[in-house]
Amino acid sequence: MAQSSKSLKELTFDEVAQWIVVDSKVYDVSKFANLHPGGAGVLYDNSVAGQDATKVFFGLHRQEVLYRPQYARLQIGTIHGEKETIKPLAAGEVSQVPYAEATWLSPGYSSPYYTDNHRQFHKAIRTFFMEVVQPESARCEDSGKKISQEVVDKLGEINFLAMRLGPGKHLKGRKLMNGVVKAEEFDYFHELIINTELARFGARSFIDGILNGGVIGLPPILNFGTPEQQAKFVPDILLGKKYISLAITEPFAGSDVSGIQTTAVRDGDYWIVTGTKKWITNGSFSDYFTTLCKTDAGFIVLVIERTDEVSTTPVKTSYSATAGTALVIFDKARVPVANTLGAVGKGMTVILSNFNHERWMITGQSLGSQRMIVEECLNQRMAFGKPLTAQAVIRSKLAAMISRVEAAQNWVENITHQMNNMSYAEQADKLAGPIALLKQFVSRTSRETAEDATQVFGGRGITATGMGKFVENYHRTSPYDAILGGVEDVLGDLGVRQAIRKMPPNVRL
Ligand code: HEM
């Protein structure tokens, strides 16, 4: 029979091979192929085009790729009789990957520390973070922008910053996490949950950008401020209407706090402050600076408001500018004497009493990051035709990573339990040494795990997008945990010196 005159479309093999299947979902990649970051050719390969490409897809992409709107709309159907099997975690859900969660969150395990309320709180905060904060964290970590006021306002509604300051009077009358936990029941385990959950963003700079300045800059006002000072500064800062940071370190003095050179000279009802502070987290956008200065009569801490005599410039560090790390210059700043925290000459006490909480907070975040990285590494790609975990050398790295994170978890929880059972003064006396040693341990193991994870991920571990993006972020930024709040070696030494000081005189071998 003669062919009909109707002109038939002439197709190339490339055009025919334009559908692929990933986890039972059929995608038409014809219009996308030339835009595909991995190139068009791979999509037309015989093993991919018109085939089930699930295995190869998940070996090369994170699951989230399929949920991005621009790619989700490439889906044109599903395979008859088959169902999607690989699903992202629903908001608030816990991971089923072994060791991806602490034992207290893993089905069938128990813990002496956590109550039902901690579990409810965990679910609520994880849901809130995933729904409200996670998209912002990805945006800010890339762009270096300050976290938006819209999200900060939402954080204010759940009393995020107030909770990050730990249990205490400042929580009274506040509705915490939409009422999931009562102010008087909030304890350090609730706070630990917030800190470890923050780490799941996999965006280290954002974790500091999300009001960390307040976590370390506000306690001196809460613990040493007069009622007038508290009424003036605290409410707006807790709601995120004003920002504060802690200004101690200088180009001249880091962990050696007593070496600072910023001076405050009395002039009637004012202090005239001159000096430079460096590496001030959130400094770029802070309205207030809780600042350690030197006077003739010893150290003092002042709350310095941003005025024309106070300037900030960003410090370009190895993480993104979303943390707002700044150089802060006080050029004869006039600070009302009414802004002095505690007694003149007792500034070091104000600052030192703050360090335990800050260091403990860092251990929680560092611990959460380690765990997230263990999950990334256990859930790994194919290499040499087998899952990477078929290689003994990879399993040995995983064994080390798991042991480190579990050891860190147990030590952090033990210290948190002690904090729950000690007054602030007892914590300062009994826990300064142990917390210093804990921080040294957690940040050191963190960096060992970052190194191992980078080896497991290979080239992807040094690529800021795609499969290895969390490992890359972690490898680049885990040293922050070893530096901020006191460098690792100094803390190790502090822990041992504290132990030696407490050695009873009447014991001998
Ligand atoms: C619906 C289907 C697909 C979509 C939406 C998609 C999307 C993407 C995206 C967004 C990237 C950039 C890296 C990332 O963000 O992860 C990428 C990279 C890549 N894709 Fe695809 N892809 C698809 C299917 C495939 C398939 C079936 C293959 C099979 C070989 C493939 C091979 C690659 C390769 C080799 C890269 C580069 C990976 C790298 O740089 O490490 N893609 N793809």
Image: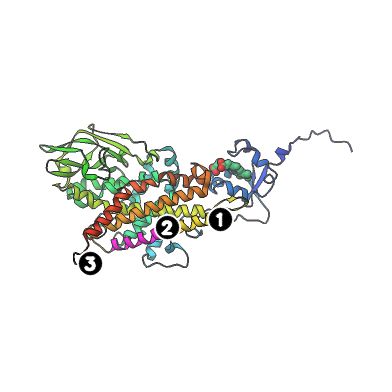
Q: Which amino acid lies under the numbered mark 1 shown in the image of this protein? A: Thr
Front-most of 96 and 356? 356
Crowd rating for badge 1 (residues with CA inside 10 Å; few <14, some 14–19, many 20+): many
In the image, which is nearer the foreground, mark 3 or mark 2?
3
Q: Which amino acid lies under the numbered mark 2 shown in the image of this protein? A: Arg
The single residue placed furthest to the left in the displayed view is 268
Q: Which residue is mark 1?
A: 389
* Picture residue at 27% right of the left edge, 36% below the top: 328
Q: Gap between marks 1 and 2, in whole Å?
A: 18 Å
Q: Is residue 398 left or right of residue 49?
A: left
Tags 1 and 3 touching, CB below 8 Å: no
Q: Which residue is mark 2?
A: 404
Q: Earlier in the sequence, mark 1 or mark 3?
A: 1
In the image, which is nearer the foreground, mark 1 or mark 3?
3
Quadrant holding ligand 1?
A: top right
Please give the range of residues in magenta. 406-420
Q: Secondary structure at mark 3?
A: loop
Q: Gap between marks 3 and 2, in whole Å?
A: 34 Å
Q: Earlier in the sequence, mark 1 or mark 2?
A: 1
* Picture residue at 40% right of the left edge, 38% below the top: 144
Asked if the stretch drawn in magenta spans residue 475, the answer is: no
Q: Which amino acid lies under the numbered mark 3 shown in the image of this protein? A: Arg
* Picture residue at 31% right of the left edge, 56% below the top: 437
Q: Secondary structure at mark 2?
A: helix
Tags 3 and 2 touching, CB below 8 Å: no
Q: Position of residue 253 (x, y in %)?
A: 25, 41
